[in-house]
Amino acid sequence: MHRRIAQGALAVTLLSGTALKASAAEYFDRIASFPITANLPKDADPKKGTVAEIISASEDGKLLVYTDSPGEAIAFIDIADPAKPQAGGQLKVGGEPTSVTVVGGQALVAVNTSVSFTKPSGKLVIVDLAKKSIAGECALPGQPDSVAARGGVLAIAIENERDEKVNDGALPQMPAGALVVGALKDGALDCAALKTVAMTGLAAVAGEDPEPEYVDINSAGKIVVTLQENNHIVVVDGHTGQVETHFSAGTVDLKNIDTKKDGKITLTGSMNAVPREPDGVHWIDDNRFVTANEGDWKGGSRGFTIFNKDGSVAYESGPSLEHEVVSLGHYPDKRDKKGIEIEGVEVGHFGNDTLLFIGSERASVVGVYRDTGAAPELVQVLPTGVGPEGLLAIPSRNLFVATSETDLRGEGGVGPHVMIYERKERMAPAYPTIRSVKNADGLPTAWGALSGLAADKSQAGKLYAITDSFYSAAPRILTLDATKKPAMITGDILVTRNGAAAEKLDLEGIAIANDGGFWLASEGNLEKGIKNLLLKVDAKGAIQEEITLPSSLEEGAKNYGYEGVTVTGSGANEIVWLAVQREWADDGKGFVKLLAYMPATKSWGAVRYPLDKTENGWIGLSEITAVGDRMIIIERDNQIAGKAQVKKLYAVSLAEMKPAPLGGELPVVKKTLVRDLLPDLKGANGYVLDKVEGFAVDAAGDAYIVTDNDGVDNSSGETQFLKLGKL
């Protein structure tokens, strides 16, 4: 059902081509990141997943309680000092906890005990927070998904979720879900007095099989319930259990969105009559609530909606937040059906401001909006761990908390984290560190996966970056203005071959050529039939020359090839240097090649570079940059978060860079530590990002580094672009 909406122009004002206004105001900055693996028992199976899903806090805001469904437990974090969160351990709850809320000194935990989709069951577990022990349990008439309590009213959404493997997840799939309501008197709950409120016969979509997803309660005791797959919303009186009103969540027409998983972000697609299918919901005041329109069956409108209690739409975000996410490099190209997938919402009253927190599961960000009574104002966007789920405002302490539910440890990635943010008066928020301006079409310039940097030879603060193979359908050179804060991506150049976007490239390095064009390094991948290539392109991105490895080297070239390129000398003395990331077949263990190509004679040479040692993973090179009389090289391990040990800048004197002919003994250069980058990476107060891949020194002598966010594929999408100053 279509409803008249108020499109929010304010939500896209940050895309005007300038940074956030640098005037003193209150912003959130991340002050801590807590790895939830710190709460696991010492004998926990490292192969078993763990998550931090829904989160609540004690009434004084000093103890966090979150659900860990795979661990069948809730867990605790002591944030008496929010900048130094401490592990509080776990408590098993006898099933899969799906939601938690704190009332007084107790945590009320909804627990799924179902043996199958067709035989759902559950319970409400009452936990004494002081003792961290179970004080009681109430049986529930099915599988619970959300619990809320306020003003003596208790509400539990009994979802009885569908099996997505049956009939492609189509409804109906019985038994039907329902709403459970109860009264809390002085914190006590009478299990026998719990009421089941039927939700059947209300929705036009599979009305016989409602699937209540999320509940929230306003100060008048009214419960709002989302029926996600049914695309319906119900308002119930929490004191009487009577349905007061219900209505379709409606549909949205979307324009200027990316709809294809094709290795490029193109905001030219559209989708019409997309069901909102809201997941999270939260009252803003007693007359309005906001929904997170995730979609789960047929929908996914990529945004959020503010509804009046009578069902009329007060505001529809459309793709405005998604466009902001594109500008920040957080857009997940592999999730085009539902885009950034808005899943969670929270509302907090901070001083005179009512703030809306909108969580994007796939972009791993939270948009912070100021309620204006009309179109909300986008204040900032916060980076989170991978897959944020639980959002929690703690206004009494000026804090906000976000959980993450994606565990990538089994793939060598990062585990879930709980991130803590504090609101203070600042000139500007710390994040983002880099973003893009609008392009000629009035849309954000898309970017991500920055894998190399180069500096303009004459203009201070002007840099160039490249995107790697994640955007293989549209390899690009980006122009950066690093004099702005955040740094601004001001333009892009498509790399072309015979007039079309160049294919089968994995651009990892960029250098300024002496004629004003660029040298690009493309990393090979034997499994995909992609060769290591040195490319000479003109200033417009057209490939002029493709230089392959000598056959003697190609035979021994493994994956993990070219990772950086730089230039020394000119004319007959010009040398193009290439950093090889890891050892090839003809390298001794712990040594990699720095290859030298002489354009004047089209000949090759090399030196050998000694790698650091590591106990975990591997060590390799990410960048090579000629600076004055030395080469600066990024050397890093492939470890992330607490396991990261080696993220360093090393220098090699140019006097030592004397390439020997290939096929013979290669000289080993000496390296000197210039800077350990771990303190810089830890300064963002998140977890240490693994891929420091770009380095450049501008015309004023200031050094910069940038991390590669892997195109938001199994990554939080966070990019750190940092000015290091003079080295």
Image (cartoon, grey):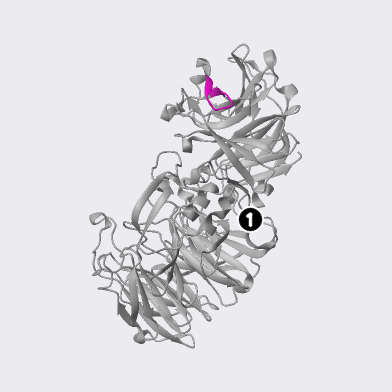
Residue 232 is at least partly visible in this image? yes
Q: Amino acid at mark 1?
A: Asn
What residue sits 56% from the left and 43% below the top?
616
Q: In the picture, which quadrant includes the N terminus?
A: bottom left
Up-down relation of residue 504 to residue 439 (above or below): above
Residue 111 lies left or right of residue 707; in this view the side is: left
**Is residue 543 shown in magenta?**
yes
What residue sits 39% from the left and 42% below the top?
261
Residue 112: quarter of image: bottom left
Q: In the picture, which quadrant includes the C terminus?
A: top right
What residue sits 45% from the left and 28% below the top?
504
* Residue toward you, 251 or 139: 251
Residue 669 lies left or right of residue 716; in this view the side is: right
The x and y percentages for residue 540 are: 56, 27
The x and y percentages for residue 62 are: 60, 72
* Residue toward you, 485 or 656: 485
Residue 258: quarter of image: top left
**Is residue 341 shown in magenta?**
no
Residue 322 lies left or right of residue 176; in this view the side is: right
According to the picture, the residue beneath numbered tag 1 turns out to be 685
Magenta residues (range):
534-545
The x and y percentages for residue 390 are: 49, 64
Residue 369: quarter of image: bottom right
Q: Residues within 10 Å of mark 1 (few under 14, many from 20)?
A: some
Residue 417 is at least partly visible in this image? no
* Residue toward you, 669 or 429: 429
